[in-house]
Amino acid sequence: MIFFDGSASTRLKSARADQDGDTTDLIVSVCRAPLFPLAFQGGADPQTITQVARQHVGGSETGSALGSAKALYNRARAPLAGFIEDHKTAMDGVAIVADTAGVISGGLAVAALAAGGITLAPVLGVAAGLAALALLAEDGQMFYYEITGNEVRKKKLANSWAYKLIETVAPILAIPDMAVGGVRAVGELPTATREVGQLAEETQSASTRLANQRSAIDAYKDAHLTKLDHPNIMTKTQKMQAKANRLAGDVQRAQAKLQKATNSLRALRLIELPAYAASTYGLGVYATDPPDWSDTASSVSEAWHSAVGRGRSQDLHHPAHALLPAQLPPQIAGTPAPLLQFHVGVRPGSGAPQ
């Protein structure tokens, strides 16, 4: 009898060979919850770790205020969650647009960091932009598989630990940026609009003064056309031209301020506010149809233990290896899988497992 815990095996009792020299090995393998211990009572029906965890957590909340609030929340969001599930392809397409807006907004935050140093708002914007970039990569793949009808790759991607982790964690990274950058963008819109209007008026006024000064110079020259070489006329003309040059400088500075304010207002309207709206939309969908945190944690834990297990030294000739597949399939939530499994292997007298 051999006990196998998923990473190593131990022989509990040696087998006795029959008259032909063959032995029979009974392999007992157990699956454990990766995050917390579970106490099983009696003969439990075959079920997944996720289902057991839900029952375990749900049982502690029975009759509590938290359990009642959770039940009310689930009933309230059920219609919207059903609508999202029925229109998943369209919702994923909108998600790609929202992710793109978040990536562009993150690019602006990177530029702000490069120009103004390390400050809170741009740092949060960069974090949200990186999260949007990760979501764009995963949502883009899923949307492509959906519109091409590739159900095999779609299910494989949906069951991968990376996809579950990104879809679970990345939207939460946008919350700090929404609380700081999003509120700031909404509050700055009226101020930026007024500033652009005032600068436009100042630029127009400076341009009018410059045009009037140049007209005055032309009129003065026309009035003294035969005396332009006189010293007093030349001095007056030079003073008027110097004033026109100062006014031209005022116009250039006003135009530069107007251009900068216009660019900021355009970025606010076309990038930051849409990114804020996209984050609000994404978190709304996240709250309406939240991912399964326990399933995500289980998938990440299994991937981690699988990666660590590959680096351990194992007995390559142990009979337990003959009873395990070369690659374990991904765990799909809801599919029946026994917590305790039994396998029987026959080892002939030659010692090679069958």
Image (spheres, rainbow, N blue to C red):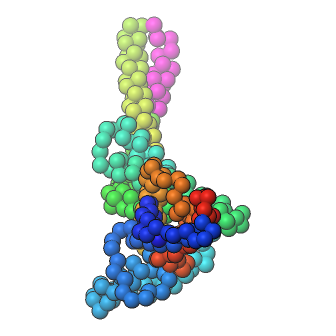
Q: Residue 149 location in percent, x, y?
A: 71, 67
Q: Residue 26 location in percent, x, y?
A: 51, 72
Say which of 279 and 197 sits in front.
279
* Quadrant of the image occupied by residue 24: bottom right
Q: Is residue 330 magenta?
A: no
Q: Is residue 44 visible?
A: yes
Say which of 310 and 12 sits in front.
12
Find the magenta span and give its range: 210-229
Say which of 98 and 325 sits in front.
325
Q: Kindly give the residue lying farthest to the left in the view shown.
A: 64
Image check: 93 left or right of 168? right
Q: Residue 110 location in percent, x, y?
A: 41, 42
Quick check: 1 above or below 135? Answer: below
Residue at x-position 33% and y-position 59%: 176
Quick check: 34 above or below 310? Answer: below
Quick check: 120 above or below 236? Answer: below
Q: Kindly give the residue lying farthest to the front in the view shown.
A: 19
Residue at x-position 45% and y-position 80%: 51
Q: Kindly give the residue lying farthest to the right in the view shown.
A: 148
Quick check: 243 above or below 175? Answer: above
Q: Residue 63 location in percent, x, y?
A: 29, 92
Instruction: Look at the magenta stretch and give its main secondary structure.
Output: helix
Q: Is residue 213 magenta?
A: yes
Image check: 260 left or right of 343? left
